[in-house]
Image (cartoon, grey):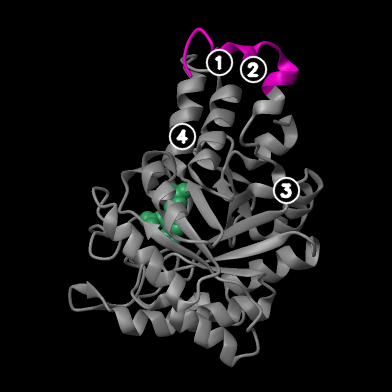
Amino acid sequence: MTFPITRFRRLRANPVLRDMMRENTVTLNDLIYPIFVEEELDDFAPVESMPGINRIPEQKLGQVVKEIYAAGIKAIMTFGVSHRKDDTGSDSWNENGLLARMTKRAKDAAPELLVISDTCFCEYTSHGHCGVIHGEDVHNDHTIENLAKQSVVAARAGADMIAPSAMMDGQVAAIRAGLDGHGFSNLPIMAYSSKFASAFYGPFRAAAGCDLIGDRKAYQMDPANGREALRESMSDEAEGADILMVKPALPYLDVLNQVRQHSLLPIAAYQVSGEYAMIKFAAQAGAIDEHRVVRETLSSIKRAGADLILTYFAMDIARQGF
Ligand code: PBG
């Protein structure tokens, strides 16, 4: 059937019809808010490349997570800004280290707020890489042992979910075994399964204080590769991931949609720091309407197949509504 019998505009004629025909909605249940927590910091430190985002002083984290929860956010992802960096990132698996302390502090202040622990080393290593360096390279098998240690420490501190982002082979299996071996067989893993070596992480590196010597191309994925992203996702699923993730989001909606076609697991998409910065700065320059653009991006990410979205806009949305 086609025009003039078919007229698409019939179902677009008024707001009620348009609301009824809407295929996707985004709610606060879908959003995860990433935050940066710094030790030995006196006051909130604005991240210049991410307008509206601050590094949170460790001592003020309790007050902040209470505000986040009161605003209606259900889940946060925590990143530590470490002052105790070394060549392995050992502070991240120290029972009294920043990662353990911030996790515990967040859970104590807002027990109902889900704390998802980003599980990686780049914020804790002096060289800024996501693992232990042997020779010229990040050593895979040594790093996944350390990831398992870090996960157990996060779990003991009260984390509700572990989110490995180091892009080491076998990291999900190693973490699952580590958690299960320490009584945390019910703790879910959200795997950064398709994580690309993206230039869109630029502002994050300033926010998390993890400038890097070199690049991450020997462990993160080539932005040109879609098929490989499926293999990575399928392999994380086979290793026991409970949720898969695609990161960044908007430039990789095709990947997200393909992962959606191939897996029955819940899928998360990470709208990263560079995606956030582009919208914020374009809006500040008067080029776009921030409110509408943000909602359009989130609904595109949902339409492509995401169940969950990690976004620095979560707090704005919680305050302003959809
Ligand atoms: C690494 C990590 C990164 C991000 C999240 N986890 C940076 C990287 O891989 O270089 C980027 C997030 C963002 O850009 O918002 N643990």
Among numbered discs 2 and 3, the one appearing first in the sequence: 2
- Amino acid at pointer 1: Phe
- Amino acid at pointer 4: Ala
Residue 223 vs residue 38, the one in the foreground: 223
Among numbered discs 1 and 4, the one appearing first in the sequence: 1
Residue drawn where x is 28% and y is 56% of the image: 227
Residue drawn where x is 72% and y is 53% of the image: 74
Residue 83 vs residue 258, the one in the foreground: 258
- Amino acid at pointer 2: Leu
Among numbered discs 2 and 4, the one appearing first in the sequence: 2
What whole-number distance in Å separates the C-alpha atoms at marks 2 and 1? 6 Å
Can you say whether 314 is above or below 190 in the image?
A: above
Can you say whether 82 is above or below 44 in the image?
A: below
So how many labels did they put on this image?
4
The local secondary structure at tag 4 comes to helix
Q: Which residues are magenta?
A: 1-18
- Could you tell me if the residues under marks 2 and 1 are in contact, i.e. CB atoms within 8 Å? yes
Location of mark 1 (residue): 8
Q: Quadrant of residue 161?
A: bottom right
Q: Closer to the camera: disc 2 or disc 4?
A: 2
Location of mark 4 (residue): 277
Among numbered discs 3 and 1, the one appearing first in the sequence: 1
**Looking at the image, in which quadrant does ligand 1 appear?**
bottom left
Q: Quadrant of residue 217?
A: bottom left
Location of mark 2 (residue): 11
Location of mark 3 (residue): 73
